[in-house]
Amino acid sequence: MHWNSISLSRSLLIAGTLAAVTLAVTPSRAQVDPPPGAGRLAHLDGNVSIQPYGADNWGQAEMNQPIGAGDRIYTDQRARGELQVSRVRAYFAPNTDLTLSNSNEQGVELGLAQGTVNISSDGFQQGQSLFVSTPNGGVSLAYRGDFRIDVYSDQQSTVITNGHSGSELELNGAGGFSLILGPDQAVQLSGTNPVVSQFVQAGIDDEFQHWSGAIETHRYQSRSSRYVSTEMEGYEDLDDNGDWQPESDYGPIWFPHVDRDWQPYHNGHWVNRPHYGPTWIADEPWGAAPFHYGRWVQINGRWGWIPGAREAHPVWSPAQVVFAGGIHIGGFGISVWVPLGPGEAYHPWYPSSPEYVNRINQTNIRESRVVHIQNTYITNNVTNITNVTNITYINKAAATGMKPEDMAAGHSAKSAAIKVDPRQVEHVQPAPPVFKVPTQPVILHPVAKPVAVQDHRPVLINHTGQQVTAAPDAKPTPVPVKATPPVAVKPLPGHTPIGAPVVGVRPSTPTAPMPVHPNQPIINSTPPAKVTPGQPTNNMAPRPIPPAPTSSNPAQHPVPATPPPPAAHTMPMPAPHITPPPPATQPMPQPAPRPTPPVAQHETVPQQSARPVPSTPAPPAAHPAPPDQPRTLPSASDSKKPDPKKTPPPKPE
């Protein structure tokens, strides 16, 4: 199909102006706007179960399933997967009980009751942090970082291992326990109040670490990061499932590998999510990004996806569609939706503020030769989207309809679709979807086998050293003091103790020799070995550092500034950032300082320094908040492929 740029530009601008409407909003943005984004499940392998917040039963988890605050995940003995939320990626191993306790303006809070998680973060916007609650203490991260937590529930112990090139971790527990854990350090916490802490060596290696490291490597080598924001969940899945056309009237376009009769928002189903209502789950394994961000267009009979600006903070939506109102078939109303095209405004069908409506449109519409972003997508005198008529949508021929009861029950849209007469959507009237909200979370797929944990929510120790239920907005309470002697620290497999355990106070400097950096691991994607229930996987391996993306044609594929490479999980144990007492023998030489990694987009960088040991437990030190660093635009020279014969190998640290 040949497009006339002038006439198309005019039609898109008119459509965008007419579509600048939304639901009625209230003056308080904080009260009405949904949480900042939603999590999703990815790379599921084996039997993974989910307990939605508000439900007592468990269901079978599925790829690209949206995850919200309070949703709980459990993996069977040979299962694993990934939880992506905001700029955090939590890889969970077999026999793991993990909850997304909260996700809001303050950051992300996870709860780990048992098992193993490997966590990577690209950093946070100013004022946000990551918090992880465990049975023995809480972990906080305010910057880019990379660390692992192993919870041995049957041993009443938790091991926290900080990554090779991550930031400092802040650990807190009951009774005023506080500890700053530097890079390449590991500590074992046992008991609750008092907490018994024991430094341990961390140079361990296992298949789970290789698996998660391979995914991180692929993410940072992704070709798609040249065209989309790396804050967009699932962008790395586009590489092997479609082709990029770098230049067009709309900017870069991604064309999926699909059949000729394929169309967007037709293969999948709807689920009800808190705050959002109807939310689309695509059957396509690559559907996390293209169905929750950007716009769709047909060019020469092929469907292509147009992402928003690469430099923007993309705002997630439950589906980038418009629902058409007033359509009846057989005497009853049906829900009909149309994929949004270039420049067409998104109308939230859930409560939202004018600022939210502007932001979600401006970050998902790309400025181009034929599409221009508006300053506002709000019409103040319009109080309901049903007042708007006669809007012509470019993708109206791809409209899909369903009965409200089929839609609410999560039935397949492809199987339950109702044929819509094209004349009925000739002039779409935007309206909220015809959708009966279920009173309880819908379990679409029963579990393959019963889960091996109790249904009631676990109680953990959070980042303030208080006990709290792993659920949204749970009220923390003080941890009862144990009258019996403290829990004896038991040696754990793969975690050699360094020095003596300390009860209730900050540990002293370990004096054992540091382990040698292990060799680079060979990536192995086979399923993990069988693990005893209640025990985390063991043996941490270094995560490989990928090379910068290359291109066979630099002119066609400019390489933008990419996020920092994944931290290599080589875990030697240097002395922690505290001042030790004068040693009786020759002091251990300190490792040479490492170069500062590149700053990610809009990320603050911690200022790390030596930390003296206070005589009494002290509250955690506040990190200064440097200003955000904008991501630099790409240059053509960045895409030149280095000559391996001329490029010397990197020096070991």
Image (tube, rainbow, N blue to C red):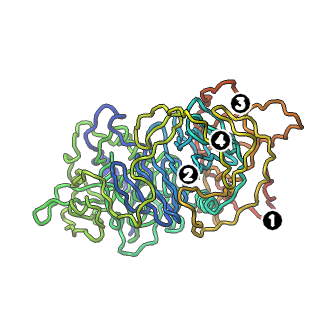
Q: Specify the label residue 645 is tagged with.
A: 1
Front residue of 174 and 621: 174
* Circles 4 and 3 in contact, beta carbons < 8 Å: no
Q: Amino acid at mark 1?
A: Lys
Q: Amino acid at mark 2?
A: Asp
Residue to which mark 4 is pinned: 167
Of the two numbered discs 4 and 1 on the same chain, state the one appearing first in sequence: 4
Foreground label between 4 and 2: 2
Horizontal side, residue 594 vs residue 121: left or right:
right
Front residue of 411 and 14: 411
Per the model, the C-alpha gap separating discs 4 and 2 is 30 Å
Per the model, the C-alpha gap separating discs 3 and 2 is 33 Å
Q: Specify the label residue 154 is tagged with.
A: 2
Q: How many numbered discs?
A: 4
Mark 1 secondary-structure assignment: loop
Q: Specify the label residue 611 is tagged with.
A: 3
Of the two numbered discs 1 and 3 on the same chain, state the one appearing first in sequence: 3
Q: Residues within 10 Å of mark 2 (few under 14, many from 20)?
A: few
Seen from this angle, which residue lies furthest left? Answer: 331
- The x, y position of residue 459, in whole percent, is 46, 42
Per the model, the C-alpha gap separating discs 2 and 1 is 52 Å
The quarter of the displayed image where residue 551 is located: bottom right
Does residue 119 appear in this view?
A: no
Seen from this angle, which residue lies furthest right? Answer: 586
